[in-house]
Every structure is written in structure tokens, then in C-alpha cells.
Amino acid sequence: MLRELAEAVEALTTVRPLVLVLEDLHWSDGATLDWLAYVARRRETARLLVLGTYRPVEAAVQAHPVRSITQELQAHGQCMVLAGGSLFAAGPGHRTPSAGQILGTTGRHEPRPAVAAPGQTR
């Protein structure tokens, strides 16, 4: 099932890029995290950007696997973590990352397979 869903997303992205936003991953089930990890590890090119949010404190209290999966993907360069709502913070001395840094684009404008941004506040 993981492969089939990943291939379906890959087919959807042949015409135009897709941004998939998943909030509150600290409440997600194991199947969702397995799929995200599978998609991030795939070697096939897909024009897909996954933005996932989770609250690190809640993930730690619940011993939720989102934290360990994020760390593993980050260790292999398959994920970028933006801590503490850094996408939206503003003020003196705060430097917001550029779109290229957030998307992890290369010279060919291919996004990295997965991006996680824990600690989003509402």
C-alpha cells in the first residue's frame, strides 16, 4: 500500500508540483508516519513538498514516533527541521529563511523529499 500511494502521488506530480501540508503530526497514526518516511526515502524524482508540523513537547510526552522518524530523516538529509515557528516569526534580529532554503531547492529547482516544521503555534 505504501508503494501504491507513493506512485499515485508521483503520477499526480508529473504535470505540476504538489505541496502537501500535514498539521499536528504528533496526533498521527503509525501508517501515516510510515508513508511519510517511505516517500522521503524514495529515490524516484517527484515534484512534491511535504510540510509537516508537530509539537515537540506533546510528541515527547506521548513518546510519539514522529520525533524519532524526523530525526532519522534529518540525519540522512531527507528532511529539514525549522524549529519554533521560524517561518512566521518576525522582529529585530530575526532572520526568516529564504524560499530556497525552505524548499531545499537545487540548481535544477527540485525540492527535497520532505520538510518538517515542528512547534507551529496557532
Image: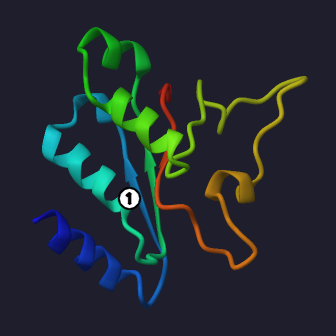
Secondary structure, mark 1, is helix
**Which residue position is annotated with label 1?**
41
Instruction: Please report the residue visible at 67 percent of the width from the left and 75 percent of the height from the top.
Output: 109
x then y, percent, for residue 5: 19, 70
Residue type highlighted by circle 1: Arg
Q: Residue at x 83, y 34 (%)?
A: 95
Looking at the image, which is closer to me, 73 or 4?
Answer: 73
- The relative height of residue 109 versus residue 94 in the rendered view (above or below) is below
The structure residue drawn at horizontal position 9% and vertical position 65%, both measured from the top left corner, is: 1
Q: In this view, does 4 lie to the left or right of 12?
A: left
Q: Quadrant of residue 103?
A: bottom right
Can the viewer see residue 24?
Answer: no
- The quarter of the picture where residue 105 lies is bottom right
Q: Is residue 111 above or below residue 122?
A: below
Instruction: Residue lying at the far right in this picture: please name it.
Output: 92
x and y percentages locating residue 81 in the rendered image: 56, 37
The picture places residue 107, in percent across and down from the top left corner, at 76, 75
Render colour scheme: rainbow
Is the residue 121 above or below the residue 15 in the image? above
Q: In which quarter of the image is residue 10?
A: bottom left
Compared to residue 54, the image places residue 42 above or below, namely below
